[in-house]
Image (tube, helix red, strand yellow):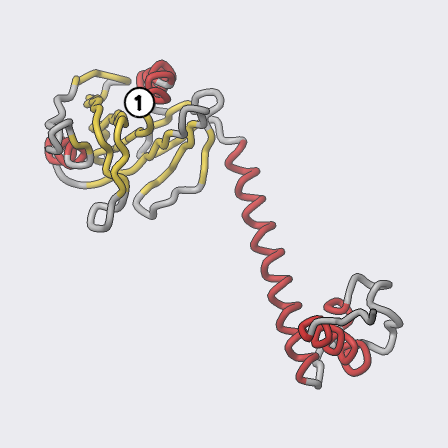
């Protein structure tokens, strides 16, 4: 029985054959000897196939550069031991990971990995009053009746500054303030609002209840350990 080569494979063979004949540099004798057909392209290929392959080569290089930059950022964040914002500093608890902020409003972001579900810690600054921002957090958490929670904050003094600390359990509305949200039941939100000399600083942590319970000690240590370097 004769082996039939699919049309797509024939086209691919034709493309790379034309690349090798028309667009490869004179110093190349085979694709395998120099890393593949894309690497053998002339600087300015003339055939249609060669130009298409050149676009593929450029895309390949752009992807490699992007991946390299992402890996560099990941390596840099992996070594972060503290977060500094508005003249304040918090030590990052062990096993908590600094990640690139997923929202431009966030100045820094941490990931708290757990087999019970990951939690997120976000550092940010904003205007408004303490009470208005506590109410905003309350609207992000729904109680068992589906109503927003009215948070009551405990006021602490840390490094000579007032810090308003709050904790809420319920259904977390995950998403941007003015966009679509995803309901995440059985969640916990912990927050701290610092009255700094440069305005209000916000630290908000949220995640599954069980995972948040396990991380409570590390959260309290981070918040109470705030310094003014």
Look at the image and tell me whether residue 226 can be seen: no
Q: Residue 147 in the image: state x and y as whole percent.
A: 10, 33
Q: In which quadrant will I find the C terminus?
A: top left
Left or right: where does residue 15 sit relative to residue 87?
right
Residue 87 or 64: which is nearer the viewer?
A: 64
Q: Is residue 218 above or below residue 12?
A: above
The residue at which mark 1 appears reads as 209
Examine the image and state in which quarter residue 56 appears.
bottom right
Residue 3 or 210: which is nearer the viewer?
A: 3
Question: Residue at the spot x=38%, y=37% of the render?
Answer: 108
Q: Residue 102 in the image: state x and y as whole percent.
A: 38, 44
Question: Residue at the spot x=77%, y=80% of the render?
Answer: 18
Left or right: where does residue 5 sit relative to residue 26?
left
Q: Residue 118 in the image: state x and y as whole percent.
A: 41, 30
Judge the density around disc 1: few (<14), some (14-19), many (≥20) Cα neighbours within 10 Å. Answer: many
Disc tally is: 1
Look at the image and tell me whether residue 57 can be seen: yes
Residue 143 or 78: which is nearer the viewer?
A: 143
Q: Is residue 16 above or below residue 108?
A: below
Which residue is most to the front? 1
Q: Secondary structure at mark 1?
A: helix
Left or right: where does residue 183 sit relative to residue 78?
left
Question: Residue at the spot x=30%, y=45% of the render?
Answer: 105
Residue 18 or 22: which is nearer the viewer?
A: 18
Left or right: where does residue 137 sit relative to residue 14?
left
Question: Residue at the spot x=80%, y=76% of the render?
Answer: 20
Q: In which quadrant will I find the N terminus?
A: bottom right
Q: Residue 87 in the image: state x and y as whole percent.
A: 33, 31
């Amino acid at each position: 029985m004769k082996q039939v080569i699919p049309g797509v494979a024939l086209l691919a063979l034709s493309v790379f054959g034309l690349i090798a004949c028309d667009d490869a540099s004179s110093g190349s004798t085979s694709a395998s000897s120099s890393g593949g057909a894309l690497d053998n392209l002339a600087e300015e290929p003339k055939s249609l196939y060669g130009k298409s392959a050149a676009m593929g080569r450029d895309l390949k290089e752009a992807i490699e550069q992007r991946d390299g930059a992402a890996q560099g950022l990941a390596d840099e964040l992996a070594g972060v031991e503290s977060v500094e914002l508005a003249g304040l500093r918090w030590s990052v608890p062990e096993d908590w990971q600094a990640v690139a902020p997923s929202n431009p409003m966030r100045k820094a972001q941490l990931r708290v990995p757990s087999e019970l579900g990951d939690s997120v810690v976000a550092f940010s600054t904003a205007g408004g009053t303490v009470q208005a921002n506590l109410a905003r957090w309350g609207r992000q958490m729904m109680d068992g009746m589906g109503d927003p929670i009215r948070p009551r904050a405990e006021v602490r003094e840390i490094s000579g500054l007032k810090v308003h600390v709050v904790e809420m359990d319920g259904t977390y509305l995950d998403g941007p303030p003015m966009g679509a949200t995803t309901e995440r039941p059985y969640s916990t939100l912990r927050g701290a609002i610092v009255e700094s000399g440069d305005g209000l600083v916000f630290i908000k942590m949220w995640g599954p209840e069980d995972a948040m319970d396990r991380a409570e000690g590390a959260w309290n240590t981070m918040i109470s350990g705030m310094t003014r370097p």
